Image: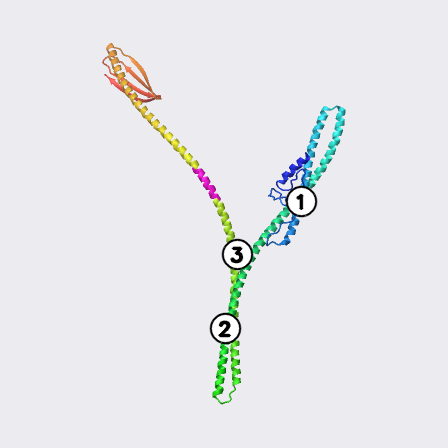
Amino acid sequence: QHQRRRCLVNRSYGAGGGWCPSLQGPRTPVAFVPHGGTSRVRSWGVPPAPPPGIDRGVLPVRFQEKEQIKKVNDRFVRFIEKVSVVGILEQQNKVLEVQWLLLQDRGARGSKVEASVFFQSQIHGLQRQLDTLERDKQRRQGELRLTQGLVEDFKNKYEEDKSIRNKAENEFVAVKQDFDDSCLVKAELEARLEGLKDEINFLRGIFEKELRDLETQIKDTLVSAGVDTSRSIDVQGMISDVHAQYELIAAKSQAEANEFYRKKYDLLSLSADPTDQEIRSNRNEMNNLHRQIQRVRGESDALKKQRASLQAAIAGAVDRGGLSVCEAKERIARLEEELHKDKQQKVQRVREYQELMNVKLALDIEIATYGRLLEGEESRLGCVTSQKQHFSLGFGSDLVNKGFVFHCPPPNKTVEIRTTETRNGRILYESSEFIH
């Protein structure tokens, strides 16, 4: 049971980091990443070959850091094992306390005393072990906090080194680009220099050829002068003077050519320096533009996702609105149908009301006729009779009451017929008629 429980504890820690041994196999150390981070299993053997362009002097430091993390993981695993042992001992302590209580209830007084002494000694021993384990637990918790702090420090250091490495790689790329550009500029300037040297050599060859032509012309002139004249002329002095003059002219021309090409080279050098600065500034601007493009692309992707979600919400709202509109149209159609039926019923009731009013008028006329007949009979008999008759006609939900009062005066008197129409206690129509 102890081995099974330990394996479960180690498996639970193996999900986020640490090691997860089997019941018989050896331990396999892995990288421990606290706080629920993502861990990748990696053996602590020979470090992998570094990628090109990375300083190999950093590898021993990283390998040493990995070894330190391995030791920290081993200490953490041992602490977890001890914590699991503490939990098992606490459970055993609770079981023994329950057994002791049961034995106290069932046993006799002597057996109770013996059992109490025995269990008391056992409890004291277990309590001492528990206190020892609690102290060990507190110490291990302190070591765990210290280890976690070390892990956090190593993690922060790793992140800093990673950022420094990325920064150095970026600087290396920038310097490499500058070097490539400088090499291109240097190659271009060397090509220009070779062209200028070729031009100088060409001009020098032309100058030497012209000089040789002049010397031959001078020699021909001297020879012809020696043939034609018999005077003694210092030809050698003249030749030396001319030669000195041409050498002076050649030196002056060479100095002027050197000065001209030196000025031109200085001008090209001065123009190359601002070009390098412009290239660097343009490269910085390009990097800034690349970063801005990436940021804008990220914002564009976020806006596209937001747009897609809004379009989905709009489509859902349109669908729901379409259903609501269909339901509303159906309800309107039902209400219009009911309204049409109500109108037809109203027209039918109006017709019934008109028919009832016609019947009422006919009855009123008939009642008036019967009243006149009764009046004539009473007048003939010479009696005066007062009589009230009440009639009720019901149609629909209304009630119409009619009241007639007949005054039968003596013969040769005026008779008054008063007609009153009421509905729900309200007087709707009242008329009087006199009969002589």
What amino acid does circle 2 point to?
A: Leu
* Label ID, residue 203: 2
Residue 116, horizontal then vertical, whole percent:
74, 28
Q: Which residue shows up at 52% across the image and 57% down it?
A: 283
Q: Is mark 3 on a helix, strand or loop?
A: helix
Lower sequence index among marks 3 and 1: 1
The numbered mark at residue 284 is: 3
Q: How far apart are marks 3 and 1 (CA)?
A: 44 Å
Q: Which of marks 2 and 3 is in front?
A: 2
Magenta region: which residues? 305-318
Mark 2 Cα-neighbour bin, 10 Å: few <14, some 14–19, many ≥20 = some
Q: Mark 2 or 1 closer to N-term?
A: 1
Quick check: marks 2 and 1 in contact, CB under 8 Å? no
Magenta segment: does it hold 315? Answer: yes
**Looking at the picture, does residue 377 appear above or below residue 298?**
above
Q: Position of residue 341 (x, y in %)?
A: 35, 27
Which residue is label 1 attached to?
72
Can residue 263 be seen in the rendering of this structure?
no
Which of these two is toward me, 3 or 81? 3
Q: Which of 428 and 238 is in front in this view?
A: 238
The quadrant of the picture occupied by the C terminus is: top left
Q: What residue type is labelled 3?
A: Asn
Most common secondary structure along the magenta stretch: helix
Q: Compared with residue 393, is residue 98 higher up or lower down, i.e. above or below? A: below
Number of residues whose C-alpha sits closer than 10 Å to that of mark 1, classed few (under 14), some (14–19) or many (20 or more): many
Q: Residue at x 48, y 83 (%)?
A: 221
Quadrant location, the N terminus? top right
Q: How is the image coloured?
A: rainbow
Res 242 seen here: yes
